[in-house]
Amino acid sequence: MADESLFDFLHMEIVSHIYREQQSSKEEMDHKDRAVCVSVLESMGFRVGQGLIERLTRDSPSFKDELDVMKFVCKDFWTKVFKRQIDNLRTNHQGTYVLQDNTFSLLTQLSNGKQYLDQAPKYLAFSCGIVRGALSNLGLDSVVTAEVSVMPSCEC
């Protein structure tokens, strides 16, 4: 429990720091500034995801196909990183996968409902990077995005 809280607080401080640094010379951030912040956070997460997946798959046999990789990410990887499995994995069988987490840990601290919905993307960028980094090291080039319609539910 303490580890989860420490990670949650560290994540919130990293996001806050990146945004504060970008805004330090300006009165108000525009769309371009926010995009830079999201990109920095996603890049940090990418490197973290690469390192984590290396450790988790060190003694694992190679995966048969994309679906096996995605099942591993949903069950084992997500559990190690976020302390729970994905609630739902959907695919169109053409290379598009949707991972749904109904109580995403990094959003539960913010709100339940739609109150801070506009703030959600900055708190999801690091996590998208983690998933993209993990998939990259598993041999899958991907684009990872996140959608939030009601917090703390998240789809990647």
Image: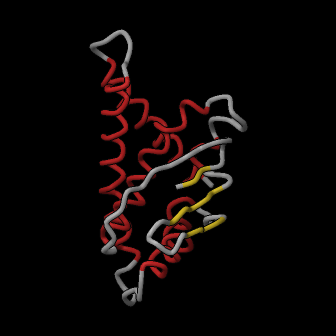
Q: Residue furthest right?
A: 113
Placement of 103 over or under 90, stated as above or below: above
Horizontal and vertical percent position of residue 53:
37, 70
Horizontal and vertical percent position of residue 94:
46, 72
Placement of 1 over or under 138, stated as above or below: above
Q: Choose between 89 and 91: the one closer to the eye.
A: 91
Q: How many marks?
A: 0
Q: In the picture provided, is 95 more to the left or to the right than 118?
A: left
Residue drawn at x 55%, y 62% is 98
Q: Choose between 58 and 122: the one closer to the eye.
A: 122
Q: In the picture provided, is 77 more to the left or to the right than 37?
A: right
Residue drawn at x 45%, y 51% is 145
Q: Choose between 148 and 21: the one closer to the eye.
A: 148
Horizontal and vertical percent position of residue 130:
40, 57
Residue drawn at x 59%, y 68% is 90
Residue drawn at x 35%, y 47% is 42
Could you tell me which quadrant the N terminus lies in? bottom right
Q: Residue furthest left?
A: 25
Q: Residue furthest top?
A: 27
Q: Choose between 73 and 91: the one closer to the eye.
A: 91
- Quadrant for residue 110, please give it: top right
Colour scheme of the rendered structure: secondary structure
- Quadrant for residue 84, please give it: bottom right
Horizontal and vertical percent position of residue 143:
37, 57
- Quadrant for residue 35, please give it: top left
Placement of 147 over or under 134, stated as above or below: above
